Amino acid sequence: MKLLFLTLALTFTLSFSLAQLSSVEKKITTNVDKHQPEAIALWKEVVNINSGTMNFEGVRKVANVFQAKLDALGLTTRWIDGAPFQRAGHLVAEHKGKAGKKTILLIGHMDTVFEPSSPFQEFKQLNDSTISGPGVADMKGGDVIIIQALQALKDAGVLKDLNIIVYLCGDEENSGEPLALARRDLIEAAKTADIALGFEDGDGRFETATIARRSSTDWQLNVKGIPSHSSQIFTEKIGAGAIYEASRIVYTFYETLAKEPNLTFNPGMILGGTDIKHTPDQNLGTAFGKSNVVAQDAIVTGDIRAMSPEQLKKAQETMHAIVAKHLPQTQATLVFGEGYPPLAPTPGNYQLLEIFNKVSLDLNLGPVRAVNPRDAGAADISFTSGYVDMAMDGIKVRSAGGHTIHETADPRTMPLQTKRAAVLLYRLGK
């Protein structure tokens, strides 16, 4: 009864004025509505399969479901084994249409932040506008939009002309290592493509899309001091100790860089004392220290997010320079890890947003504006930066509470966003 009620609720859409749509585009939108009950069933099926990133079996089960759907649509699918980068793997599907047409890369991910130990495991309809479930928005809802948009295009007889690559990642929420290997195939797909479209959430709004995402890179500060009785601190022989030096560095980061537009750098954990133990894989640590002993060691871990490669490089150089100015009798090193690159707001990205906005207006779904980059985290589409002419993310269901047990999505926006995506693909393919 609940599924029937949900299906009936989903037949409600905004009143469409289709005067701006071609006859083919009208067929596409009609096909989306025809298959909406299937979309809800698929959505429920994959949400009810736990696919926390480290649940490799669960990620593979979700991949099997999507692989069968893509095979049925006539795409050529393949599974990329994730063993070399310590994750489940990725699903890739390709469709070769007419020669000379642009190749469009569609990006999603199958994993969630909810491992089998999480109490949040089930797709539930709360009312006609709210579905709850692990990954219902981030991002199994977006994955279903990809499948249903391609289905609508096939039913309208136009998928056969399109050059499409579908890339469904298995470790977006907790990237494999080394990252260069975990994202190698995505980058290779980007090199082949002309346009990249991501179906990852941005700010949860139906009225927005994402044409810029900031980078995300981890950093670790390691500080050494000379241990001694606290009565000797600040002497020429003992100096300032590790905790004072760590504090100086972190505060100077803030003082020097905090006003840079769209740049953030967050120290998430600090350990200091006579004896510290750090377990980076689990983001854990312990520290022992006495108030009458000068700290010997300190570790600070954090992340940095920038709007462009140039901004990231400049900030990292500034941080290294700050670290180099040691307090007396201390030493410190700063190490940046692998990370997600920025997706800068290029002219091509703005042009793609304009095309998407026109599609939305022609569907009588209202305008679409760009997400503030501060409201959207890092995502896999950033790895296409520099390879494709146009990139846009955030083609998703309306949602809230992502990465928490309160994650919800608005099912009424599923068919609407699918229509946007399908018509956009058709126009880009032309």
Image: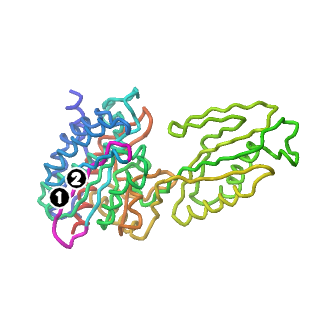
Mark 1 crowd level (few <14, some 14–19, many ≥20, 10 Å Cα): some
Tell me where residue 159 sits by quadrant. Answer: bottom left
* Residue 422 is inside the magenta segment: no
Q: Is residue 121 above or below residue 398?
A: above
Q: Is residue 372 above or below residue 233?
A: below
Residue carrying label 2: 149
Foreground: disc 1 or disc 2? 2
Q: Is residue 280 above or below residue 17?
A: above
Which residue corresponds to the image point at 42% horizontal and 46% vertical from the top-left?
Answer: 175
Which residue corresponds to the image point at 55% horizontal and 37% vertical from the top-left?
Answer: 279
Query: As drawn, is 92 to the left or to the right of 307?
Result: left
Query: As drawn, is 18 to the left or to the right of 218?
Result: left
Which disc number belongs to residue 26? Answer: 1
Report the magenta residues as a range.
85-102
What is the quadrant of the C terminus in the image?
bottom left
Which residue corresponds to the image point at 75% horizontal and 38% vertical from the top-left?
Answer: 295
Tell me where residue 134 sits by quadrant. Answer: top left
Number of marks present in the image shown: 2
The spot of residue 274 in percent (x, y) is 72, 35
Tell me where residue 160 sits by quadrant. Answer: bottom left
> Which amino acid, by three-letter code, is at mark 1?
Lys
Q: Secondary structure at mark 1?
A: helix
Q: Is residue 8 above or below residue 213?
A: above
Mark 2 crowd level (few <14, some 14–19, many ≥20, 10 Å Cα): many
Which residue corresponds to the image point at 38% horizontal and 43% vertical from the top-left?
Answer: 86
Q: Secondary structure at mark 2?
A: helix
The spot of residue 402 in percent (x, y) is 43, 40
Check contact, mark 1 vs mark 2: CB within 8 A.
no
* Residue 89 is inside the magenta segment: yes
Give 100 or 376, whichever is nearer the viewer: 100
> Which amino acid, by three-letter code, is at mark 2?
Ala
Give 192 or 367, whichever is nearer the viewer: 192
